[in-house]
Image (cartoon, grey):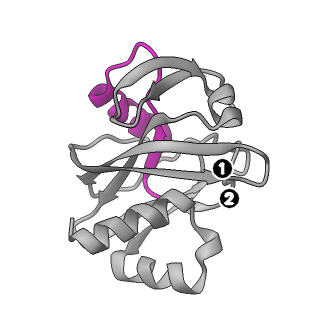
C-alpha cells in the first residue's frame, strides 16, 4: 500500500489531521474517501476490477474510481487526478451525496470512511492503470443490481452500500 498521508475527519466530515494510509487502515481511523461513478450515454456504469495487488478487496469489481484525499491536495482537483491516474481519462464530475461506512477485512485492515459520491458522464474506451485495475466493463445499472443478489462476493462493500443509497433516494 503506498504510504501517503490521508485526511482524517471527525463525524461532521471536518478534516482534523493527516495520517499515514497504513496506520489509518490498521487502526480503523475515520477518514475521507471518494467514489466516482461514470456513466455513458446508454446509462451503463463503468466498473473497474481492482488489481490483485491491492491491499484490500483485490480482484473485486467496483465503481469507476475510488481513493482517499491525500495531504496537500485540493479535494475537487484530486478526484480528477485520480480518475486520470486510475482509468486514463477525465470528465466533469458532480457531487451527489456522502455517507459513512465501516467494514473490517480478513487481512486485519478496516475502512472507516465518509465516502463522497460523484457522478460523471463519459463515452469512450478507458485505459486502466495496471497497478489500480486489472480490467473494466460497462454494465447496465439494472444488471448491476441483479448481480448484487446473485454474486455479491464479486463486488466491493462500498459499491454495494453506495448503490443501495442511490436506488433508495433516486439519485
Q: Which mark is residue 59?
A: 2
SS category of the residue bearing label 1: loop
Based on the picture, tell me whether residue 31 belongs to the magenta stretch.
Answer: no
Q: How many marks?
A: 2
Quadrant, the N terminus: top right
Q: Which mark is residue 51?
A: 1
Quarter location, residue 92 = top left
106 or 142, which lies in front? Answer: 106
- Characterize the local packing of mark 2: few (<14), some (14-19) or many (20 or more) Cα atoms within 10 angstroms: some
Above or below, comparing residue 131 to residue 57 in the picture = above
Based on the picture, tell me whether residue 79 belongs to the magenta stretch.
Answer: yes
Q: Position of residue 163 (x, y in %)?
A: 38, 67
Q: Residue at x 58, y 33 (%)?
A: 29
Disc 2 and disc 1: Cα gap in Å? Answer: 6 Å
Q: Position of residue 167 (x, y in %)?
A: 30, 73
34 or 24, which lies in front? Answer: 24
Q: Which mark is residue 65?
A: none
Q: Are marks 2 and 1 in contact (CB under 8 Å)?
A: yes
77 or 56, which lies in front? Answer: 56
15 or 125, which lies in front? Answer: 15
SS category of the residue bearing label 2: loop
Residue interval drawn in magenta: 63-86
Comes first in the chain, label 2 or label 1: 1
Quadrant, the C terminus: bottom left
Q: Position of residue 140 (x, y in %)?
A: 36, 77
Above or below, comparing residue 1 to residue 144 in the picture = above
Amino acid at each position: 500500500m503506498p504510504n501517503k498521508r490521508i485526511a482524517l475527519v471527525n463525524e461532521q466530515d471536518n478534516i482534523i489531521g493527516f495520517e499515514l494510509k497504513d496506520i489509518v487502515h490498521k487502526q480503523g481511523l475515520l477518514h475521507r474517501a471518494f467514489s466516482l461513478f461514470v456513466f455513458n450515454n446508454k446509462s451503463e456504469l463503468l466498473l473497474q476490477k481492482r488489481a490483485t495487488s491491492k491491499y484490500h478487496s483485490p480482484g473485486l469489481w467496483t465503481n469507476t474510481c475510488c481513493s482517499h484525499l491525500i495531504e496537500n491536495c485540493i479535494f475537487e482537483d484530486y478526484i480528477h487526478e485520480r480518475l486520470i491516474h486510475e482509468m486514463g481519462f477525465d470528465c466533469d464530475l458532480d457531487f451527489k451525496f456522502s455517507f459513512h461506512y465501516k467494514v473490517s477485512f480478513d487481512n486485519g485492515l478496516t475502512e472507516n470512511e465518509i465516502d463522497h459520491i460523484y457522478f460523471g458522464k463519459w463515452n469512450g474506451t478507458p485505459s486502466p492503470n495496471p497497478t489500480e485495475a486489472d480490467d473494466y466493463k460497462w454494465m447496465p445499472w439494472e444488471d448491476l443490481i441483479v448481480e448484487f443478489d446473485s454474486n455479491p462476493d464479486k463486488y466491493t462493500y462500498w459499491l454495494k452500500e453506495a448503490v443501495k443509497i442511490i436506488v433508495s433516494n433516486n439519485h
